[in-house]
Image (cartoon, rainbow, N blue to C red):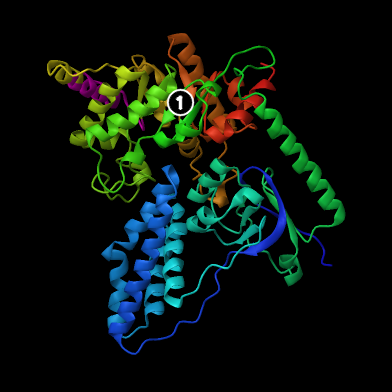
């Protein structure tokens, strides 16, 4: 029996898993070379078609963010800029598998070495695309993982995650990966334990380490290979404690959130697609603190009626509770074909409200849809990526113009309260420039990233990207204090709002309104109940 091997990484989705390791790293299958270049081209075309069909089938079975991920892959497979180099290599005499591997390899390296969060996070999608087509070329298939397995490897493909039945347990332990990746987002929404940034196993590993049972502690970000009996017992105590806390948290779900001292805290939900509310009991939350609208901006720009129906659905579901809809936050890590622009540094470029103001013909459609939907509930609208007062004033003026135009045509409409995201440090440092806004919503993900100059998807600087750093908390506290003095409501809608470890610091900073993903609602309320303030 080998000595236990302990690896430390970064928690991407809290939880515990005990089970056999399942190797994610692909095994290269043998490809049978064809007689002519025309046959090679046909083989690749057929494989791409098979991969496209597989993605289309998966898309039909998913929705929201998961569908968006798959649609990106589908769009890439339809892009001649991606497939063209492979076909050119085949024409020059390369076999289909080599041509495809080389063409995708060059793209993947570009994504992996990018200085932009978005492109690094998309590297897993590109590897997924490569491997799906290669499997179709070789008529190979993914080996089946045993129930409750811990998937271990460099990274995990989004399609592999979505095709896995997690009802029997299991988890994910990655040598690389990112806590901000799409799979990490999916893992959090489904409660699948996940750790990233574990690094290579190292010289101390043996086949026996990888063949036995592993213990994944995704609450603290570690994994133990070939554990001793004492370590198994200790792990099970931690796992039982976590399960007890999770079960205890469910008892808080139907109650209003209050601290031990009786201080009320509003807890709302973040949603990415109108269908998200179908699985949420409206009585368990105080409304929607963030409704993203990027889901509408997929392969084609949405028309006014499509947007209106999506917004109306959520407003009617909320039964009078506030629904805060963010105008399209495209750019940065969310490119939209036909809308966003190519930039060398998109996170500091034309994104969020900057892009909307630069493309008023698109923005006005969204404004009209929001104004019309407002008559169906308690709508609030917020603008993302605001840095200066002029941006807010310009956006508010467009709302006033479109309201007047709708009114003149006799169309039912209502002006909602207009607020801004606090995610650019300039706003957090000098909020006094925005006394006319209806509310502030702190975007903790981007605010922390910009303040600490540390990308949240980069394991090498993950220790810097913490909302609990005094510099970040001081800014949050100053915005909360400013809001109290000026009577401007302040909320927080980033990932930190659903992190039980961060909630006490956020409440101490003066926040009394948090918005979390639905899967974190119960744990957030339970964490609030443990705060003494």
Tally of numbered tags: 1
Q: Is residue 390 magenta?
A: yes
Quarter residue 424 falls in: top left
Residue 284 counted in the magenta span: no
Residue at left 80%, top 58%?
A: 227
Q: Residue 26: which quarter of the image?
A: bottom right
Question: Which region shows up in magenta?
Answer: 384-402
Which residue has dot 1 on it? 289
Report the side of 192 relative to 297 (left or right): right
x%, y% of residue 307?
28, 33
Q: What is the secondary structure assignment of the residue under circle 1?
A: strand
- Is residue 248 shown above or below 83? above
Figure quadrant of the N terminus: bottom right
Vertical relation: 391 (above or below) 153 = above
Residue 141 falls left or right of residue 242: left
**Horizontal and vertical percent position of residue 80:** 26, 65
Q: Is residue 447 visible?
A: no
Tag 1: Cα neighbours inside 10 Å, few (<14), some, or many (≥20)?
Answer: many
Q: Can residue 86 be seen at all in this image of the molecule? A: yes
Q: Viewed as shown, does residue 75 lie left or right of 22?
A: left
Magenta span: helix, strand or loop, mainly? helix
Front-lying residue, 419 or 452: 419
């Amino acid at each position: 029996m080998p000595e236990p091997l302990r690896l430390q990484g970064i928690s991407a989705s809290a939880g515990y898993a005990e089970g056999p390791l399942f190797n994610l790293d692909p095994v290269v299958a043998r490809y049978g070379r064809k007689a002519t270049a025309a046959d090679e081209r046909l083989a690749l075309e057929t494989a791409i078609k098979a991969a496209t069909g597989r993605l289309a089938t998966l898309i039909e079975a998913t929705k929201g963010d998961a569908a968006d991920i798959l649609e990106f892959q589908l769009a890439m497979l339809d892009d001649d800029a991606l497939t063209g180099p492979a076909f050119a290599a085949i024409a020059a005499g390369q076999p289909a598998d080599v041509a495809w591997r080389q063409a995708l390899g060059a793209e993947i390296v570009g994504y992996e070495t990018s200085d932009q969060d978005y492109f690094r996070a998309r590297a897993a999608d590109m590897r997924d695309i490569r491997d799906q087509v290669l499997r179709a070329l070789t008529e190979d298939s993914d080996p089946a993982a045993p129930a409750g397995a811990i998937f271990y490897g460099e990274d995990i493909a989004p399609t592999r995650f979505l095709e896995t039945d997690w009802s029997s347990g299991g988890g994910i332990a990655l040598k690389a990966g990112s806590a901000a990746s799409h799979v990490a987002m999916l893992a959090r929404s489904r409660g699948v334990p996940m750790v990233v940034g574990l690094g290579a196993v190292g010289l101390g590993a043996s086949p026996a380490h990888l063949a036995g049972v592993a213990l994944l502690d995704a609450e603290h970000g570690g994994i133990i290979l070939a554990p001793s009996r004492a370590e198994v017992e200790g792990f099970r105590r931690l796992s039982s404690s976590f399960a007890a806390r999770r079960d205890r948290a469910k008892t808080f779900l139907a109650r209003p959130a209050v601290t031990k001292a009786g201080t009320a805290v509003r807890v709302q939900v973040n949603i990415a697609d109108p269908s998200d509310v179908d699985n949420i009991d409206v009585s368990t939350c105080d409304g929607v603190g963030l409704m993203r609208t990027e889901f509408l901006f997929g392969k084609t720009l949405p028309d006014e009626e499509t947007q209106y129906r999506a917004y109306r659905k959520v407003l009617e579901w909320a039964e009078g509770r506030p629904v805060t809809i963010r105008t399209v936050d495209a750019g940065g890590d969310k490119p939209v074909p036909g809308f966003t622009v190519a930039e060398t540094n998109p996170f500091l470029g034309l994104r969020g409200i900057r892009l909307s103001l630069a493309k008023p013909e698109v923005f006005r459609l969204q404004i009209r849809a929001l104004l019309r939907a407002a008559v169906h509930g308690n709508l609030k609208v917020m603008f993302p990526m605001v840095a200066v007062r002029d941006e807010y004033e310009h956006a508010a003026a467009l709302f006033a113009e479109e309201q007047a135009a709708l009114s003149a045509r006799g169309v039912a409409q209502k002006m909602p309260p207009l607020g801004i995201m606090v995610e650019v440090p300039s706003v957090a440092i000098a909020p006094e420039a925005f006394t006319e806004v209806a509310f502030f919503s702190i975007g903790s993900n981007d605010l922390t990233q910009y303040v600490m100059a540390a990308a949240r998807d980069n394991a090498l600087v993950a220790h810097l990207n913490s909302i609990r750093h005094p510099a970040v908390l001081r800014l949050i506290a100053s915005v909360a204090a400013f809001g109290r003095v000026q009577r401007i409501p302040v909320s927080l809608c980033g990932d930190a709002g659903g992190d039980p470890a961060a909630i006490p610091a956020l409440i101490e900073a003066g926040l009394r309104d948090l918005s979390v993903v639905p899967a974190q609602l119960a744990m957030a309320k339970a964490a609030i109940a443990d705060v003494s303030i």
